[in-house]
Image (spheres, rainbow, N blue to C red):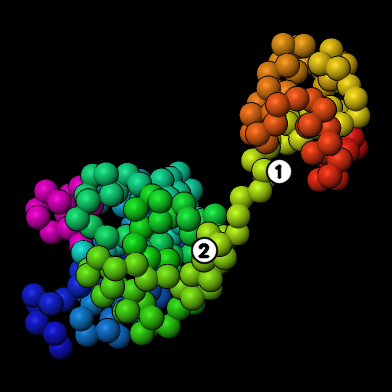
């Protein structure tokens, strides 16, 4: 067994009791890990951590489920890091989704694990967290790296409504005709056109129409 000073104190957050029970049993296999508390929602976790903070017994790391009612794991992570910045958070979920990975990291998480991770991997993630290092599930790391490498296209910067307006521009519609087609005011249509030109770095409706044709954006 590790000495008390080297033991990593862990707090579990998951809305399924059976998952928390399994995770607790899972972590008991690791000599240097001690589970010091658990909660079923993000709000409950924050309340219980406040009690632990009052007695100077905050955990080193929180294993935070992302999909929970009342307050999801991303919102809870953001609030937790604001109130208890010394506590590290590892996001835990059943699947990998690049947007969720990014959101969790932006909220302050220092790791991302799948619920079916092996005990050794969970242990590595916890030890990395207390060292201030990021530990990601391999699949999450691949998705994040791919997203960071992929350039954001100009088309992706347009909202669905702006794409509709652009298609109508390509069809030769005036601002008044666009407004009628979309049931909005002419002023709103004009604003959409200005936003489109700004986002695409274009200076005229003609350029926008040519750009839309090249990108295959046409009225549905």
- Quarter of the image that includes the N terminus: bottom left
The percent position of residue 21, horizontal first and vertical second, equals 38, 72
Whether residue 123 is visible to the viewer of this picture, yes or no, is yes
Pointers 2 and 1 in contact (C-beta within 8 Å): no
**How packed is label 2: few (under 14 Cα within 10 Å), some, or many (20 or more)?**
many
**How packed is label 1: few (under 14 Cα within 10 Å), some, or many (20 or more)?**
some
Q: Residue at x 73, y 16 (%)?
A: 190
The percent position of residue 36, horizontal first and vertical second, equals 22, 66
Taking the image as shown, residue 117 lies to the left or right of residue 152, namely left
Taking the image as shown, residue 149 lies to the left or right of residue 137, namely right
Q: Nearer the viewer, residue 178 or 113?
A: 178
- Magenta highlight on residue 58: yes
The percent position of residue 186, horizontal first and vertical second, equals 77, 11
Identify the mark at residue 144; answer none if there is no mark.
2
Q: Residue at x 79, y 39 (%)?
A: 211
Can you identify the residue that label 1 sits on?
155
Quarter assignment of residue 177: top right
Q: Nearer the viewer, residue 189 or 59?
A: 189
Magenta residues, start to end:
49-59
Quarter assignment of residue 28: bottom left
| Among the two numbered marks 2 and 1 on one chain, the one whose residue lies closer to the N terminus | 2
Whether residue 38 is visible to the viewer of this picture, yes or no, is no
The percent position of residue 197, horizontal first and vertical second, equals 69, 28
Q: Residue at x 70, y 31 (%)?
A: 202
SS class, disc 2: helix
SS class, disc 1: helix
């Amino acid at each position: 067994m590790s000495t008390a000073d080297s033991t990593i104190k862990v707090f579990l957050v998951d809305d399924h009791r059976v998952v928390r029970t399994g995770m607790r049993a899972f972590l008991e296999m690791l000599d240097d890990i001690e589970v010091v508390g658990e909660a079923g929602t993000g709000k409950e976790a924050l309340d219980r951590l406040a009690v632990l903070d009052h007695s100077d017994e905050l955990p080193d790391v929180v294993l935070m489920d992302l999909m929970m009612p009342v307050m999801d794991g991303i919102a809870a992570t953001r609030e937790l890091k604001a109130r208890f910045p010394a506590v590290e958070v590892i996001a835990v979920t059943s699947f990998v989704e690049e947007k969720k990975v990014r959101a969790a990291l932006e909220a302050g998480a220092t790791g991302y694990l799948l619920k079916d991770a092996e005990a050794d991997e969970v242990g590595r993630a916890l030890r990395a967290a207390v060292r201030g290092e990021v530990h990601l599930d391999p699949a999450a790391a691949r998705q994040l790296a791919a997203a960071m490498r992929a350039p954001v296209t100009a088309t992706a910067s347009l909202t669905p409504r702006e794409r509709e307006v652009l298609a109508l521009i390509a069809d030769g519609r005036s601002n008044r005709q666009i407004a009628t087609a979309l049931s909005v005011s002419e002023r709103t249509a004009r604003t959409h056109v200005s936003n489109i030109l700004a986002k695409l770095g274009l200076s005229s409706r003609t350029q926008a129409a040519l750009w839309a044709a090249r990108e295959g954006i046409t009225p549905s």
